[in-house]
Amino acid sequence: MSDIKQVYDNIIERMADAAKRSGRPADTVRLLAVSKKQSTQAIQALAALGQLDFGESTIQEAQHKIPQYPNLTWHCIGHLQSNKTKYVPGLFDWVHSVDSEKLVDRIAHAARAQDKPVNILLQVNTAGDPAKYGMSPDRLFQAAETLLEKAYSHVILKGLMTIGLRSTGVDNTRSTFAALRRLSEKAGEEFGKEYFSELSMGMSHDFEIAIEEGATMVRIGTALFGERTSG
Ligand SMILES: *Cc1c(COP(=O)(O)O)cnc(C)c1O
């Protein structure tokens, strides 16, 4: 078994180097440890090293794990079914995978009823990959306008999220990340920079490229914890 501290320190160092290459201080990029299908012992070990932000993909797994760690910050990164949105405010501080206005409406309703604010990111399918969730870049502006007009009391728009192309090489991956950054800059000019300050992009295999292209949050699972195992 690899030493978790060594692995963790190595990831933090690679993040800092990539931030430097993008001309930013290391503390402008937040590490989100993706603990889906990883044991609670692994979460505990990382939390003991000072890791604060964790990501989970499903409500079912989140309901089992998150209540054990109320002092950590939890991010929902998986596709959300609208009938599960009522569980979001009690579990998650952030939702990265918002892909429709209807979903925002439902999260907002639940968040208000429970008086628990939720930060959201709009997921954009920058790769135009039909196998992935997320709204098309064209729809993003309409969605942002609609949701900002509604001025939800308990939903806070913070930025954008995307999943990089996996199989088509570094240049394409880089261009999908750069595309998200340009969209975010454009949306920031149109609607206000405060709503588009976060860019969630980059995973185990491509987080350095994402940081070079402006990521403020990277979502790293297997490179931190090893292969996913338990449910
Ligand atoms: C699982 C997952 C990750 C983490 O993937 P790794 O390759 O294990 O780093 C990041 N983002 C999303 C949306 C995921 O579903």
Image (cartoon, grey):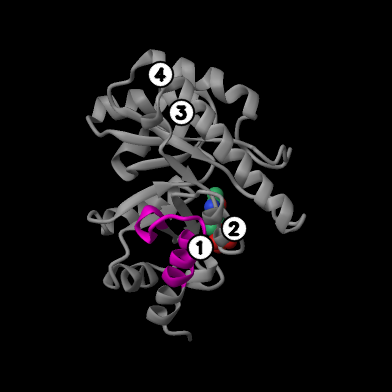
Q: Residue at x 53, y 73 (%)?
A: 226
Q: Earlier in the sequence, mark 1 or mark 3?
A: 1
Range of magenta residues? 11-31
Q: Could you tell me if the residues under marks 2 and 4 are in contact, i.e. CB atoms within 8 Å?
A: no
Q: Nearer the viewer, mark 2 or mark 4?
A: 2
Check mark 4 vs ligand 1: CB closer than 8 Å? yes or no: no
Q: Which mark is residue 148?
A: 4
Q: Residue at x 38, y 53 (%)?
A: 28
Q: CA distance from mark 3 to mark 4?
A: 12 Å
Residue 15 forms part of the magenta stretch? yes
Q: Residue under label 3, please give it.
A: 188
Q: CA distance from mark 1 to mark 4?
A: 33 Å
Q: Residue under label 2, please give it.
A: 209
Q: Which mark is residue 147?
A: none
Point out residue 153 in the picture as x, y percentages from the top left corner: 28, 22
Point out residue 51 in the picture as x, y percentages from the top left corner: 32, 64
